[in-house]
Amino acid sequence: MEAKKIQVALLGLGTVGTGVYKVLERQKEEMLAKIGVELEIRRILVRNLEKAAAKVKDPGILTNDWKTIIEDESIDIVIEVMGGLEPARTYMLEALKAGKNVVTANKDLMATNGRELMDTAKAAGRDLLFEAAVAGGIPIIRPLKQCLAGNHIEEVIGIVNGTTNFILTKMTEENMEFQEALDLATELGYAEADPTADIEGLDAARKMAILASIAFNSRVTFDDVYTEGITKVTARDIRYAKEMGCHIKLLGKARNTEEGIEVSVHPMLIDSRHPLASVNDSFNAVFVKGDAVGDTMFYGRGAGELPTASAIVGDVFDVARNMLSGCTGRISCTCYKSLPIKKMADINSRYFMRLQVDDRPGVLAAVTSVFGNNNVSIEQFIQKRKKGDLAEIVVITEEVVERNFNDSLRILETMSMIKDISAVIRVY
């Protein structure tokens, strides 16, 4: 008997799309044994037919007309790797409404329009899978939705942007300043020509919105995530952190508390003994704490052509298995709660703070008094060095309500004896 085939359409043939094409080609010989069906790419949507022709064996499958895909009833799975909000959103919605299953790597869409897309998939009884939207090739969406479903997830914290992790690794290991490390990341292809989404934490924030939604079963959008980038982190901050037995990482942090969900992305000092502190270069890792499983960590390549394609093809295989069993739409949106999102001002944190102050009697007492008057307790107060008439001091606070810390900060900024507040970084 001729093996059953499922027809697939691929939207986009850039870096990730090319990776998906390659992985599906590699899997051809084992596909039938592995998932019980053969997958065949029937159409690939591209902008430039001539340029794309060099990337595929059969240029006849290329098209620049979406109608040839959406109107083709033989196509059952649409793989969206175009990126961006439009026309990807429209194409995905139209595909689901037409009865096609969708696999996507689009973190922008899932972080902003996730509810609309998931509701549409549920209404159509079709799969919408998006493992590759967070942490590239690292399995984390499926484990949260399935393997760890027997847990109440308490916290998800992770390094989910390889570019910033590469930059901070170079600053830590080679004493580079930020711009030097960014230039190297650009030269090696880790950073885009416009690195804003990475270095300002926006990419990581989109991923944390997705992770928090799934982990806590309550919708979190990109706009809910408090975000800071790494542009203000200096080599001096990193050296001082190392002296205190810490590393500085750009961390996404989501926590489920009795008062609501805390979700943020920003640089943090983290104890060098913590597993995340040893995640270096462009690698990603997600650390999950559940009430039953305890601590677990997922580690690997967070981006790139083939790692991302690995996650996408894994989703495609899952869809194919569901189709064979007649159970597409089996796991739809898991956001069945409506938990509040806590404001950053209400969240408790510890802080690392570096200041340049007048080198004269009474300064330390004045700084201590400001903190004390605003209910901020100090864990460490260290004078690091002198330069002329100035002294550099480092303050580490106990855990404090962010609102109280910010009140202290505003007062310190007005004091003539405080010449510069050089760094303010949270401590995990």
Image: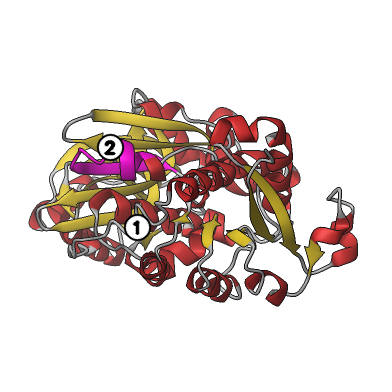
Above or below — where is 397 with respect to 99?
above
- Mark 2 closeness class: few <14, some 14–19, many ≥20 residues within 10 Å: some
Distance from Cα at disc 2 to Cα at disc 1 = 16 Å
Q: Is residue 410 magenta?
A: no
**Residue kind at label 1, given as amino acid type:** Ser
SS under mark 1: loop
From which residue to which does the magenta span run?
Answer: 143-159
Query: Where's residue 42, x and y in %?
Result: 73, 57
Taking 336 as reference, is 308 left or right? right
Q: Name the residue carrying label 2.
A: 148
Binning the other alpha carbons within 10 Å of mark 1 as few (below 14), some (14 to 19) or many (20 upward) gives some
Kindly identify the amino acid type of the residue bearing the numbered disc 2.
Answer: Leu
**Looking at the figure, which quarter contains the N terminus?**
top right
Quadrant of the image containing the C terminus: top left
Q: Nearer the viewer, residue 281 or 122?
A: 122
The circle drawn on residue 332 is 1
Q: Which mark is residue 318?
A: none
